[in-house]
Every structure is written in C-alpha cells, then in structure tokens.
Image: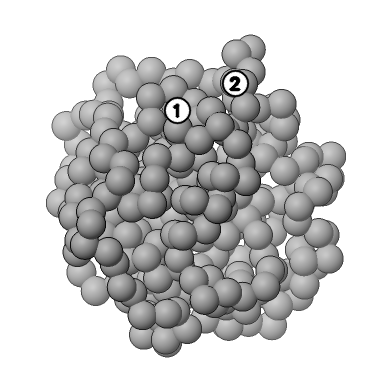
Amino acid sequence: MEVQDPEFDSLLPPLRLSRRGFIATGVAAGFSVAAGQAVAQTAIRTDAAGLTAGSVQIPTTDGNMPGYRAAPAGRKNLPTILVVSEIFGVHEYIQDTCRRLAHAGYLAIAPELFARHGDPSKYTDIPTLRAEVVDKAGDAQVMADLDAAAKWAATQGGAADKLGIMGFCWGGRVVWLYAAHNPGLKAGAAWYGQLGGQPSQLKPASALGLVDKLRAPVLGAYGGKDAGIPMEDVDKMRAALAEGPPAARASRIDVYPEAPHAFHADYRPSYRKTEAEQAWKRMMDWFAGHGLGA
C-alpha cells in the first residue's frame, strides 16, 4: 500500500533510523507520571467488553514498534483511525480513547511513536521528557511509523481504503502533517495541535506551512483560552485554509471560547466536559461524513 507523498516528503530530512532497536517495547500501564496526578472523578474508564483490545507489536523497517489496538471483536473491513498521543505517549488516556472508538465500530490503533527514544510513562517532569524523548521524534520518523501502523491495521481487519487520523496536542500537529503526507487518508481530526512554530532540522515544516499540500480535510478543535496556541495562529490557519487546495477548503476549525488547552484530557484539571463531548460528537460526524462511517 503506497501512502507516501513525494512532494511533501521532499520537505523532510532523510530518514536515518538507528539500528539499536526500540528502547520502549510496550505501552504504559496506567497514566503517565509526567502528566501529573490523574483526576479520578473525571477520568473516563471504558471497558473492553466485546472488543479485541490490548498491546500489539507493529513491524517497521528497523524493528517492532509497540502500540495499542482496539476493535470490535470478530469484525472485518473496519474503518481505521490512527490515534496520535500527546507528549505523554500511549498511556491509559490514549488507550481508553481507542476503546471508545472501537465501541463506535472503528479499528483504532495508537502507535508508540516515542519508543525509539525512551518510555514517556517513566518520566516525572515535562522538560526532561521533551529534551530526552519527544524532541528526538522527527517528522520523517513519525510519518514513516504512521504509515507502518496503517499498513499493519490493514492486515488486522482494517479497511485499507477507509483510513482516518486523530491526535491530541503534539499529536494534533501530527494530524495536519499526515494529512499532507498520505494521499490515501480520508479525514483527520486535530485536537489543539500547534499550527505555527519555528522550523528545525527534525521538524522542518509547520502546519501553517503545509496548507497548500493538504490531501485530506482536517477538523480542528481549539480552545479559546489555550495559553500555548495563539488565536492569531488559528485566524491565520483559517485564512490559509480558505485559499488552499480542495482538501484545505474542505477543512474546518472549531474554537471553543471558554476552553483551555487539553480540554478533552478527562484525567487532567484542564478537562471541560461540555466542550469535550461536543467536539467528540463533531469529530464522529466528521469521520462519518468523509467516508469513515462505522
């Protein structure tokens, strides 16, 4: 299954993966320590009844990448959603998100995109986690790993021609990039992902800089009180989308005026139930409206 987009990939640095293997060989148990103490009264717990759910190993060009998969048990030809984590990796919140999607009829797969560089769940503070793990996961590696996850899903009951992607925070930016990278993608949903930012060797393009290369429409969910993503960037993105190619013009950004960053993260104090539920419903409608109905 060919999914690369040479025009977009020409912006990325050459992919040189270390042969030392993956540092993390599995996904987290429980919530990531660096994310802070989980808020028990708001954290959603979705059971796995009727699902095939659990840790998996996804073949890549340099070894097996751990991930988490959830899907309705015994079903085939399922629409597939790639789930891209925050900086905290594939911990319980991301696993629960996969189970929610599976109960709605999707095959959801969350690859541990930081596994070559460390285990995010073991870190106790965000600056060290970023420096030692997150910032080493470059765009070329992430695009290749998502391709590998999509290819693997198509052998596990997923429909190769029904592929979507969603992501939170760090993963929200990745959604915009993947929508420019994979011409076979049907739709994406970016939850408060960075839009601007200074380019670097490992991250040479911003979401704003890739609007003219979008191949799939993206639904953005952003908080009006997000201290890390200026509304100026949201306004710039909306204007750029309106002038972009068909997939860009078909994209949409919803702003939830009273919501902060990470308003869907139900295990953190930033959670806003009303906005999170509304944005989730809109995302599900978005996927269904772009050929990914379960």
Residue 151, relative to residue 198: is it above or below? Answer: above
166 on left or right of 224: left
Where is residue 22? Give x, y as percent.
27, 50
Q: Residue at x 56, y 32 (%)?
A: 124
Q: Nearer the viewer, residue 58 or 293?
A: 58
Q: CA distance from mark 1 to mark 2?
A: 10 Å
Q: Which mark is residue 104?
A: none
The quadrant of the rendering that contains the C terminus is top left
Q: From this viewpoint, is residue 197 visible? A: yes
Describe the element under mark 1 as helix, strand or loop.
Answer: helix
Q: Which residue is mark 1?
A: 92
Q: Nearer the viewer, residue 141 or 71?
A: 141
Q: Amino acid at mark 1?
A: Glu
Q: Are marks 1 and 2 in contact (CB under 8 Å)?
A: yes
Residue 217, relative to residue 119: is it above or below? Answer: below
Q: Residue at x 17, y 45 (%)?
A: 156
Compare marks 1 and 2 and give the one earlier in the sequence.
2
Describe the element under mark 2 as helix, strand or loop.
Answer: loop
Q: Which residue is mark 2?
A: 38
Q: Residue at x 20, y 50 (%)?
A: 64
The quadrant of the rendering that contains the N terminus is bottom left
Most extreme residue toward the top is 41
Residue 31, relative to residue 78: is it above or below? Answer: above
Where is residue 80? Give x, y as percent.
33, 49
